[in-house]
Image (cartoon, rainbow, N blue to C red):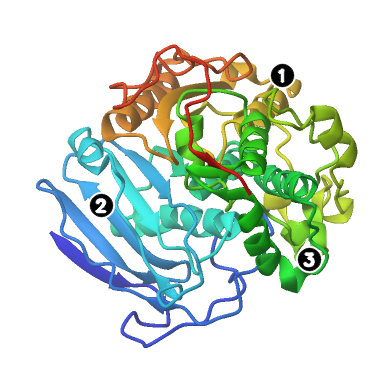
Amino acid sequence: MRRRFFVSAVLIAASSALWTVPTESVGRPGITPVACPQQTWQPTDPAFDALPGATAYFGQYDGGIYRIEIPDRWNGELMLSAHGFTTNAGPRGSELRVGLPLIREHLIQEGFAWAASSYRCNGYVPGIGLQDTMALTDLFTKFNAGRAPERVYLTGGSMGGHVTLLGMHEFPTSFAGGLAMCPAGPELFDYFSAVGAAAEVITGMAFDQPSAVGETVKKMTGILGTPPEYTAKGLQLASVEIQLSGGPRPFAMEGLRSRFLQNISGAALAGNTSPSNRAVSTQNARYSIDEGLGLTADRLNTGARRKAPDMSVRGPMGPFDELVPFDGQIQRPLITMHGTGDLYVPIHLERALKRAVADAKHDDLLVQRIYRIAGHCGFNAVEQARSFDDLVSWVRNGVKPKGDDVMGDLRDAGRTHTTPLREGDPGGLTVTPTVTTRQN
């Protein structure tokens, strides 16, 4: 059954809508998000067909467009699904879209309702994403004849994982539990800038003007090469990226292929004054590099430019919660999932989360799982469903499920939860895969 509802003053049939700041009716008190990009947004049609034995609701609200699905035999619990980064550039960058959870069929079969939002804008907006996702609970209750969910689980991948971690920290008792898949976080942009600083040392070029960053990266490309045809200097930077992001591990070189040049960020180094760039810090970056590539770690650590954070933005009293490193003060069970070959949102972010939660003495509430996967967020439905079911069982029964040690040696990590091992799995090999090189 499909039911369309419009709960905004602006109908989805309207040609466009401009949302730039939160409205009072969206989200909960206690979080100030970075504002949406200043542009016009085009809502797409969120209509979808319900699975057998369920009812679909969809439409538009102050938080974008939404989809909700409620099984006829509802178990009283709701899963909120937060989506990842959607670019606001390009011919379709103004379109607002809302997807379907990969484990949707599993959820309905098990009696769970779910809800998802486009958010009111595209871009890297985890604060906005959290507000708009949380607002779905009241919307769900309205469509469910006024019956609120007994438990709400917050889930999401990539930037949606950042949304999940942010929600578990900023609203620690609002959710029964959280599942953050390949979660990003504030330190992600430190990594990109640290790669940019290493690229400056390796290529001899510098990011000196915000307006010229793109052109500088293009010039660096000629010196570094492109995967898999790295130059000698390109291999140096590839090694640095892998070492910075967690060290040698299965599928790291494969995952780097799509991210090698994209991980070079010069905006913060060049002095861009956006809140996210002001918050960036490379002061604590410690560089390592494979021996025999013609560059030493000492040279990198002494020569790499260090960018100090603006603590008025990054500090604990900063105005934007999404830019402040997590303090680990979670109060409900949290499971994270991360792939070894993810070089877009690398696994070293899990270590930052682990340290924060341990320092806050909440280790009993965190389980982290590692998967042997090339690329970003490549979990299959079986892996996602298993972690969600384990989270639910943990919440209901109080028995903490098994995780992995993200702080240890990752060279052969991820065997416990990867189902099945992916094609081309390197086994126990720890050597860097052979790549084609060219002389610059």
User: CA–CA distance between discs 3 and 2?
Assistant: 42 Å
Q: Disc 2 on helix, strand or loop?
A: strand
For label 3, count other residues whose C-alpha is less than 10 Å away and answer few (under 14), some (14-19) or many (20+): some
Q: Nearer the viewer, residue 36 or 377?
A: 377
Residue 396 rendering spot, x and y as whole percentages: 40, 21
Q: Earlier in the sequence, mark 3 or mark 2?
A: 2
For label 1, count other residues whose C-alpha is less than 10 Å away and answer few (under 14), some (14-19) or many (20+): few
> Which residue in the rendered view is the most extreme toward the left?
52
Residue 355 rendering spot, x and y as whole percentages: 71, 24
Give the amino acid at mark 2. Glu
The disc at residue 272 is 3
Q: Earlier in the sequence, mark 1 or mark 3?
A: 3
- Give the quarter of the image for residue 123: bottom right
Q: Relative to residue 81, is residue 341 depicted above or below?
A: above
- Left or right, residue 255 beside residue 214: left
Q: Residue at x 39, y 59 (%)?
A: 139
Q: Which residue is mark 1?
A: 361
The disc at residue 403 is none
User: CA–CA distance between discs 1 and 3?
Assistant: 36 Å
Q: Relative to residue 439, is residue 176 depicted above or below?
A: above
For label 2, count other residues whose C-alpha is less than 10 Å away and answer few (under 14), some (14-19) or many (20+): many
- Do we see residue 180 in this rendering? no
Q: Relative to residue 415, is residue 138 depicted above or below?
A: below
User: CA–CA distance between discs 2 and 1?
Assistant: 37 Å
- Left or right, residue 335 beside residue 198: left
Give the amino acid at mark 1. Lys
Residue 416 rendering spot, x and y as whole percentages: 40, 13
Q: Which residue is mark 2?
A: 69
